[in-house]
Amino acid sequence: MSTPCQSRNSIEDIYGPRTPYKQEWPSRVDESCIEEPDTWVQSACVLCSNGCGMDIGVKQGKVVGVRGRVTDRVNKGRLGPKGMHGSLTIHHKDRLTHPLIRRNGKLERASWEEAMSLIVQKTKETIDRLTAHGIAFYTSGQLFLEEYYALAMVGKAGLSTLHMDGNTRLCTATAAAAMRESWGSDGQAGSYTDIDYTHCIFMVGHNMASTQTVLWSRVLDRLHGPDPPKLIVVDPRVSASAKEATIHLAPKIGTNLALLNGIQHLLFKNEWIDQDFVTQHCVGLEQLREKVQSYTPALVEEITGVPAADLQRAAETIGTSESLLSTCLQGVYQSNQATASACQINNINLLTGCIGKPGSGVLQMNGQPTAQNNREAGCDGEFPGFRNNLNPDHMHELADIWNIDYNKLPHWGLPTHVQDILSYIEAGTIQMLWVSGTNPLVSLPNLHRIREIFSKQDLFLVVQDIFPTETTEMADVVLPAAQWGEKKGCFTNVDRTVHLSYKAVEPPGEAKSDFDIFVDFARRMDFRDKEGKPLMPWNDPQDAFEAWKRVSKGRPCDYSGMTYEKLTGGSGIQWPCNEKYPHGKERLYEDGVFFTDIDYCESFGHDLETGTPLNRVEYQALDPAGRAVLKACHYIPAPEQTSKEYPLQLSTGRNVYQFHTRTKTGRSKPLQDAFSEPIVHLNAEDAAAAGVCHNDQVIVSSCRGKVQMKASVGDIARSQCFIPFHFGYWDATDSRARAANELTMEQWDAVSKQPRFKAGAVRVEKTLNAAVEVQQEQSAFAEKASVQKPDARATTVEEGPRQRHLELWLGVVYESIRSLADFYPSMTRYMGYDKEVQFGLGLMQRITRAAGDALEPMVQKYGTDLKYGRETSEALRQALFPGADTASTPYGVILTLTGFVTYTSHIEAQLSALVPVSQALWDGAFLTAVNDAKSRIERVQKWAKHQLAVRSAQTLIVPSSDVIRSDMQWPG
């Protein structure tokens, strides 16, 4: 023990003593105190995604210690180094204690009344100027469930905006996406207790030893106990996890999908498939078999660098194991073809029938302690209760629960992901951004661009946090938030365990909980339901929890059987918790029934390669009906490959002692002393080629930026390097650039929209002199923001005239329909040769005119620019249709029909764009008109395609005497 109040030195002894076991993990209480507490208050740890039960030690109104909750199912009393030390930064001198408003270029102290009044004023001004779609929210994986739910209601029910995302987009968006694709809904299939029973652990892109130290302790205890499981680790680095592996596969960065396809190839080839399970409980088997057929061990070795013999050993171990627990994290989620790769991990468990039973399951891990709640409540890429925005019944149900107009619920698309939010800010169509509990000026990719965006003069930036950060420096208003231990609420970990954290101490100064801030904003904005009652009539987080239970009831994440009383005194409880499972349900899919029923599923899925969503009709054709979906995809090389100039592939990730951007852990002296600066991990041969030795200062460069740091040589595959992403500039003592995201690329997964942090090419060069520095821009940009940004209380920055483009778009589609309707007589006159087409054109003219008639009231209502529409539609018609004489021949008929199909496709695409537009305008009549016109044009297009198919073979194959000239023109 390092002090009388510390059960162990968790810096030096990260995982604690071994307690070998099988089936029942022994308890061990970890404790760290700076003084002996007077009382202990129930909580859970928020410094990784594991969700360890914890008690907070309090003395004279101060947090003086923490200890693991021995009764908790997650950790059985254990804590990791971040939990034991990072939690004690709660009273750090740097805490934000009062609101700040930018005045005369500087952030100055303000009252809550001033700050909230200004935010409400700017919100209303933005709505008047840009509509509510000019406002966006970007939140965290650090808030409580009740706070996310309040924020979701503010955005989706109060302001009716889709612009809501969280830093879970950077962390676990792929986990949610992969589960929706495979199981039909978000929600982890497995349980932590599967570690206690499994015969094989398959860990892909998941260095559990650094990311979830207590869970890794559980794995270590199994490995040291009787009948240990096999451990297969997929990681380019020889990480602490890989060093314990039975089989370590080290693929080239960005090649996960080829590796996983190769394993499935071998499962099929050797008949290591649970055929009965797959036949009864899965769809897509033959498509998957065909897709992975070419991924032989030799090809996989060529792509990934993994020896064929190692791949075969891994596949045999997986395929012949009685049970299989698969886990993955950022090595999959932040890499090339992320969702496609995560789905293959799901496939492997499905093919072997290893799901829904003790020792078998999949944990698509989270990276943050409350990321699951963000997704459940609908503050990023989801809708509350895992509802499907493409299912009108789901959206009507949500609107009814909230008692708001269905048309006002923003369900015309998925919530806007952060990369699009940034682009809209750049374009000036979002001019208010509210950031809560996260630090995007360190965590987002390509930081130079992020700094430019956040320092825009026309952006009103609200930042809500517990400490000063790189992002608060850029804010117009800073709101001091209460943190864990200073507020009450629930949060849910990776294996669906819900913990209740009680308030132990008062927040410092004037800081308020995120819940209180969001509810106060809703009241000041006077958000009301259809009956004129307050939209969020809550006085306490428990009120919000009771409201959330109603939203979750009947959905996969069912909390309806939980209460604060049930969650008090013992262990956390897993959802679903309801009448059927009053004490929670340990594993999902025990009966082989998945959440894929068309009327229940959260998503209809996607094309994994292109990211294109499937619609209801396509999903119906797949007909999963409660069966899991085996999703297949071919490997595609990462977009940015290494070159002579940039010979190394970059990966970023976590270190065991720090968490995210170090807002809390960087202020803990033990954790900071243990890992105080970033380093770049290099292969020994790559280091030698660059003339670099261990601990040398080096400059790492990509085509986006440069950083300077020490080199650590060894324990990584050739042509690859690794940098921890935790470090920014709030505590920098010199001007060296050191944030890993100075280097990273702005590309994201096609399905999950998660950035590809584990991609991009770099070079490493030894500095000739340790004093050589790379200028970092954060301070310069903060200064620029201070100088250039106006007083936050001032009126909006003057800008040039604005034009709404709806009027142009609507004019083009309306005039295109009218132009087509007017053009039918000419086509009919010159197509006498083909009586069926000639007759059909008469019918199509009637249908087309009806489409135009449906739109006409909206054209009048929105003051459409018809002149622009006429010019555009006429130019398109002239380009698409052949000359009149040509149209009178068989070849001319199919040429005309081809132009006809293209022209109607143009109209149909424009009408498709107007569907979400009409919904975003909350105009039910507009939506009805657009859908009416769209259905008619689709009928016309279908007719033309059919006529084209009937005639094309005969006309194109059999020689004729027609003479086709290129100069034919239609009369007039």
Image (cartoon, grey):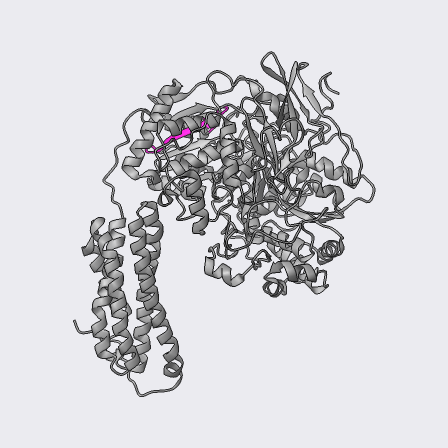
Q: Depth check: give the residue in front, 447 or 145.
A: 145
Q: Residue at x 30, y 70 (%)?
A: 900
Is residue 460 inside the magenta stretch?
A: yes
Task: Give, as a single range, the part of the protein colored magenta.
Answer: 457-470
Q: Quadrant of the C terminus?
A: bottom left
Give the left or right position of residue 537, taking residue 563 as reference: left
Residue 506 location (% of width, % of height): 53, 17
Q: Tell which of 318 and 845 is nearer to you.
A: 845
Question: Residue drawn at (65%, 23%), measured in percent from left and top?
Answer: 55
Q: Quadrant of residue 17?
A: top right
Q: Is residue 689 above or below residue 110?
A: below
Q: Residue furthest top?
A: 60
Query: Magenta includes 883?
Result: no
Numbered disc total: 0
Residue 687 vertical placement versus 324 (above, below)? above
Residue 289: quadrant of the picture: bottom right
- Visible residue check, residue 197: yes
Q: Nearer the viewer, residue 95 or 295?
A: 95
Q: Is residue 251 left or right of residue 806?
A: right
Residue 801 in the image: above or below residue 890: above
- The answer to whether 820 appears left or right of 244 in the picture is left
| Depth order, front residue of 612/180 | 180
Q: Position of residue 401 (x, y in %)?
A: 44, 40
* Observer able to see residue 769: no
Residue under the point 33% across and 77% down: 894
